[in-house]
């Protein structure tokens, strides 16, 4: 998918035809062959332009795996991502604040800071690039580079919240660049349940803007300044270019008196927003909606709405089939359900060993207390994995384990441990679980070190 190389090949072909034309004996033949060469050259140029335009605009309906790293294997509100080739990048808490680190997927001692400051010991946030107040859900790998967002260093407190920077580096932490600054309006317009994702030349900011609140110090309570002001789900598209532009491409008013949770997934030129809401005074009053946003035209459409089915741990595939887990309250039986959004009828696929999360074409049932996780694909193939020994090692050093599920790719279940302080891989092939990113691996000020982690 390398345009310059294809262009070089076509140029060689054109030159061959022109040379052939020049070597013909008669003037008429020369003119004919030169015209033919010119027409062929023009046609080739048109092909190159069309191909380049197709790649630049992403007209293909197929997902271009060579260009994008599919994010659908990671839970969107977690502070970790992958390049799809075994390298992982995460944001963890440490003694000096937030830290951005990378890993080759092996044992944690090989983790490294995303910082290219010569001689940096990664403890001074005013100097270290890895300590930079990043937006924790903003990690992406795109076109061979790591992208994230962070506040600007070395500015006054008054200026700190004027803008947020889109940052980029090579996967090894070198060549750190500030791609461009994004107005703080984008950041505040997506302040609640924020998700940031880089996709096909843009960084998308997705989140819910809360109504303006007032605080009463006497009663220590907060209330909406304007009771009629609504929560609003917004999506901003910001171009990944130094002189790039951005705009709000989607906005949806949310009803007051309802609680909202959402997930979003990118497939080719579409962004899907899946939104579940529940009445705050009646937990059985729920609603589930799916919106499709065309990333080229910015046109949006609600493609599904239901109040019949309660959803848990849902995941949407590229054919607009929704998969989710469901537990019968009477029998306590858990099942994997498939729902074709075009037909709106749920179908039970297989039984699950417990409630779980559906993601990346798999159902994952995590029992953190027992140190076990079961992974099933949609055909029913099943693997049971244990990580209790690693949990005990973490618990002995930190005093607790704080385990949560981050995602599952083709090789590993990804877990977050000690809340915000380390990430672990549980290999699907049954090999030994391991910590890959943790604060203790590079922070000399961090005291909670459990020793050698194999």
Image (cartoon, rainbow, N blue to C red):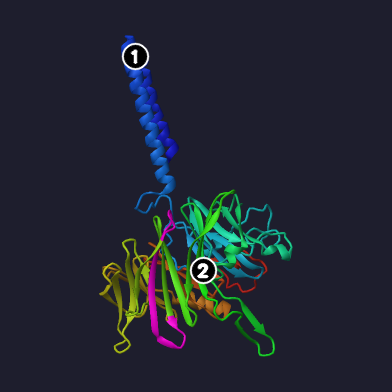
Where are the magenta residues, as a range?
278-299
Q: Quadrant of residue 383?
A: bottom left
Asked if residue 413 is positioned above or below residue 19 in the image, the reply reads below
Q: Nearer the viewer, residue 294 or 92?
A: 294
Q: Nearer the viewer, residue 436 or 175?
A: 175
Q: Earlier in the sequence, mark 1 or mark 2?
A: 1
Question: Residue drawn 66% across and 90% down?
Answer: 219
Q: Counting other residues with Cα less than 10 Å from the Cα at mark 2, is it few (<14), some (14-19), or many (20 or more)?
A: many
Q: Is residue 319 visible?
A: yes
Question: Residue drawn 74% across and 63% down?
Answer: 156
Magenta region's main secondary structure? strand
**Callout 2: SS:** strand
For residue 303, the mark is none
Q: Magenta stretch containing residue 144, yes or no?
A: no
Residue 237 at x, y = what percent?
51, 58
Residue 332 at x, y = what percent?
32, 86
Q: Which residue is mark 1?
A: 30
Q: Quadrant of residue 22?
A: top left
Q: Which residue is mark 2?
A: 207
| Position of residue 250 in the picture relative to residue 330 (left or right) | right
């Amino acid at each position: 998918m390398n345009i310059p190389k294809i262009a070089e090949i076509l140029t060689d072909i054109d030159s061959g035809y022109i040379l052939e034309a020049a070597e013909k004996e008669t003037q008429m033949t020369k003119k004919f062959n030169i015209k033919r060469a010119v027409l062929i050259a023009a046609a080739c140029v048109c092909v190159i332009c069309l191909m380049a335009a197709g790649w630049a605009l992403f007209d293909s309906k197929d997902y271009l795996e060579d260009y994008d790293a599919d994010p659908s294997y990671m839970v969107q509100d977690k502070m970790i991502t992958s390049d799809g080739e075994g390298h992982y990048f995460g944001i963890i808490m440490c003694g000096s604040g937030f830290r951005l680190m990378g890993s080759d997927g092996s044992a944690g001692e090989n983790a490294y800071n995303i910082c290219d400051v010569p001689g940096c010991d990664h403890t001074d946030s005013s100097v270290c690039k890895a300590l930079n107040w990043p937006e924790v859900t903003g990690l992406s790998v795109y076109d061979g580079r790591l992208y994230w967002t962070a506040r600007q260093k070395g500015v006054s407190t008054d200026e700190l919240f004027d803008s947020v920077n889109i940052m980029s580096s090579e996967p090894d932490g070198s060549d750190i660049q500030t791609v461009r600054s994004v107005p703080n309006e984008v950041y505040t317009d997506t302040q609640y349940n924020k998700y940031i994702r880089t996709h096909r030349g843009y960084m998308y900011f997705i989140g819910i803007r809360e109504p303006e609140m007032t605080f009463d110090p006497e009663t220590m309570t907060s209330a909406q300044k304007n009771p009629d002001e609504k929560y609003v789900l917004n999506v901003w598209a910001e171009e990944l270019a130094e002189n790039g532009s951005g705009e709000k491409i989607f906005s949806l008013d949310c009803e007051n008196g309802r609680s909202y949770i959402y997930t979003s997934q990118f497939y080719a030129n579409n962004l899907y927003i899946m939104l579940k809401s529940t009445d705050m005074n009646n937990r059985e009053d729920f609603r589930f909606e799916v919106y499709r946003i065309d990333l080229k035209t910015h046109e949006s459409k609600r493609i599904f709405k239901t109040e019949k089915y309660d959803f848990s741990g849902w995941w949407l595939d590229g054919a607009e089939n929704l998969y989710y887990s469901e537990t019968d309250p009477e029998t306590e039986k858990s099942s994997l359900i498939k729902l074709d959004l075009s037909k709106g009828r749920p179908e039970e696929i297989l039984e699950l060993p417990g409630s779980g999360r559906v993601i990346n074409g798999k159902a994952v049932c995590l029992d953190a207390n027992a140190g076990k996780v079961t992974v099933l694909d949609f055909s029913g193939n099943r693997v049971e994995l244990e990580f209790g020994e690693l949990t005990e090692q973490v618990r002995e050093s930190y005093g607790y384990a704080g385990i949560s599920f981050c995602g599952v790719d083709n090789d590993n279940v990804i877990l977050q441990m000690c809340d915000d302080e380390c990430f672990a891989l549980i290999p699907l092939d049954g090999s030994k679980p391991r910590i890959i990113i943790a604060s203790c691996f590079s922070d000399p000020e961090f005291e909670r070190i459990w020793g050698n982690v194999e």
